[in-house]
Amino acid sequence: MNIETSRRNFLVGAGALTIAIALPGRKARAGLAATRLPLKPENLATYISINADGSAVGWVGKIDMGQGTDVGWAQMIAEELDLPLARVSIVQGHTDVTINMGGASGSTGIWKGGVALRAASAEARRVLVELAADRLGIAPGDLRTQDGRVIAKTDAARSIGYGELIGGRHFDETLEWNKIIGSDLAIKGKAQPKSPKDYRIIGKSGIPRRDVAGKILGTSEYMVDVKVEGMVHGRVIRPPVAGAVPVAVDESSVKDIPGVIIVRDKGFIGLVAPREWDAIKAARKLAVTWSDAKPPFPGHEKLYDHIRNAPVIKRDVDKEKGATDAAFASAARVIEASYEWPFQSHAPMGPACGIVDVRPGGVRMWSASQKPHYARDGVAKLLDIDPEKVVCISTLGPGSYGRNDSGDIVMDAAVLSRAVGKPVRVQSMRHEGHGWDPKSPAGVHTSRVALDAQGKITGWHFESKVFSKRDFLNNEGDPSHTLAGQLLGLPLKPVLLFGAPEENYGFENFSKISSIIAPLLDRASPLRTAHLRDPGGPQTHFAVESFMDEVAAALGQDPLEFRLQYVKDPRDLTVIKAATDKAGWQKRTGARKQLRGDVYLGQGLSYAVRGGTRVAMVADIEVHRLTGRVWVRKWTVAHDCGQIVNPDLVRLAIEGNVMQSTSRALFEEVTFDTKNVTSVDWNGYTIADIKDAPETIDIILIDRPDVAPTGAGEASSRPTAAAIANAIFDATGVRLRRAPLTPDRVKAGMA
């Protein structure tokens, strides 16, 4: 894929011009007029255009990372424009033709990006009706729209198509906007979007995905497939001891490999070669003398001791209510437990790849970053040029769900391309992807409750002692938050942040605290932390929801009935009751330890809120008595994300969430010695495979058409680990407080 035509560049010439833009799995035809179109958030044409044939294009500054969000966007546009869905195309992510709407981020694809497209489409429909009123001599109130035409209500013979009205020209209507660039960008026109009672397309399932055929048939072009004329292949050399920098390089060690150019700049060292295999060989052979860096890590086995003993550098009171200290001072009983969560890797199917072509007139880059506009901005800052001179072409990657290594790789490629004056393609090897990608933070999470003499909770204190979840930013917009930028000596700008669990337990007194500790290595670290799907959510809710079960057991109460004493929000109650009813919740006041042959059977409950989305989950599991293997045989998930645009896509998002978070709960753990990360392949970093998939994932979708959508991309990641841990307790009587819940830990607990 090599898109050389930008929306700005082809807005020249006369007449109606039709250009085909092919993006991953999508095609869009844009018939546009002969004037330059400024990409401004207040311009209606920034978001919507109408082709000469009356079809529409949605221009989206977000990214679908494989969940089919583009279909949801197309449904929202088609609904508001009264167009058949097949006549709506989506262009996403290409920075020269879409405005920065935050990329893929925080489950905001439909929640925020889709809502903006809905507002733009409603406004476009209003403009089309007014244009038709002028052309037909009929008052706007006497016109209706259907199948891309504006039609007189009293005489269907009098009509005009969208293409005749504006096809090949852009809308020049001005919108209101909230002056925020990124995921929170919001726009508003004069028109009101449709009422849910008038929907024909929103809420429908059975709509074919636009990306699946190409992926299955092998015709979709991924980042690793992109070829650019004249490109060379690059590799970056990483130190054997994290924190070490090169002090000497023996260039003669690779003199037998043709065309190798070594690039060294401060702590950065890399090379390029005309052939990729030569670049790989040269990276292995290059003799580098490294500085005598002190091994920076405590070793994996000492991680949680380090966390507990490390000084707190920032303490945030995330949420509080009432007088928690007084509640504990007067408590008849206090229960406390701590839960441990490891570093985890993004571990996409393939390590990162990117291409950057630095030329005097500007820069073109190809990236699988889920935030291409920020990747563009970061490269521009690194090269000290105007971002308007950098174009980032968004491409399909092997996976993302957070800040993975795709953003780092284009920075590496930019440094190499600047040095050699050619387009440079950099692709990591597996050991580099696992070893040097940003990690989800490790931490210790502690819950305490104060109880009165009747066993009622009078106070709750929750505290996370953790590494920041944003040692690196959640985007690549600042090169100081990339490996290349830090190796070049850019000033460090850590973001000290973690956040609190979200639930709606109606405790009278509570406090939620984040205590941040310093990173193990502050510059160019293989254990630097950044967002992984639902940042902080699985960790905190593993602690909160496991603890709720522990307290229920200590009081001799059923875990479901115990929760229902404190949950008051009707939407939360609905999902909890829906999940437990569907799963056939089996009342208990302690571990039942049901043994069938060599297999213990257990059932566990967990619940959480994320950004307004409510999720309750029940895990039905088997625990093998001899091996300790845990298998979630069945998941039951009740999910309320407000308005549902496409039920099929929500179900698929939930299924993917559940499978990935099950993998994190049962298997995934970054290991390291004192020098570096040691889990650098699929043997060292285990993930769930097909044998670990459940027999059934029962999903109950609770649609609320009159409630704004709040996202389905991450919420069901949140309760998974606790539901499994609670089911393990029910099955075996063993309470595991350290993730992942591996067979060895289960066996040790049972012993």
Image (cartoon, grey):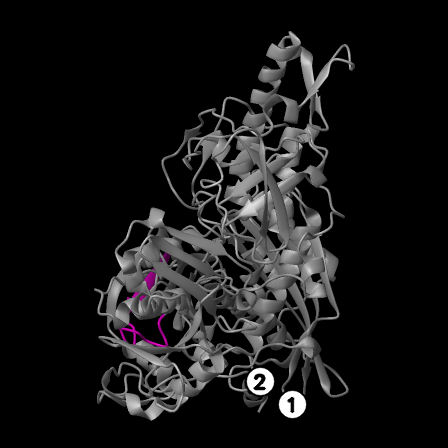
- Given residues 406 and 346, the one toward you in this image is 406
Quadrant (top left, top right, bottom left, bottom right) of the N terminus: bottom right
Instruction: Quadrant for residue 526, please give it.
Output: bottom left
Res. 586 in view: no
**Amino acid at dot 1:** Thr
Q: Residue at x 43, y 40 (%)?
A: 185
**Amino acid at dot 2:** Val
Disc number at residue 627? Answer: 1
Q: Is residue 268 above or below residue 249?
A: above
Q: Is residue 530 above or below residue 702?
A: below
Q: Residue at x 43, y 33 (%)?
A: 36
- Given residues 438 and 668, the one toward you in this image is 438
Magenta segment? 509-528
Res. 305 in view: yes
- What x and y, as percent, mark residue 701? 68, 49
- What x and y, as percent, mark residue 45? 50, 32
Instruction: Quadrant for residue 363, please give it.
Output: bottom left
Disc number at residue 746? Answer: 2
Label 2 environment density (alpha carbons within 10 Å; few <14, some 14–19, many ≥20): many
Asked whether disc 2 touches disc 1, contact meaning CB atoms under 8 Å apart, the reply is no
- What x and y, as percent, mark residue 659? 63, 68
Residue 224 left/right relative to 630:
left
Q: Earlier in the sequence, mark 2 or mark 1?
A: 1
Q: Main secondary structure of the magenta part?
A: loop
Q: Secondary structure at mark 1?
A: loop
Disc number at residue 205? Answer: none
Residue 372 in magenta stretch: no
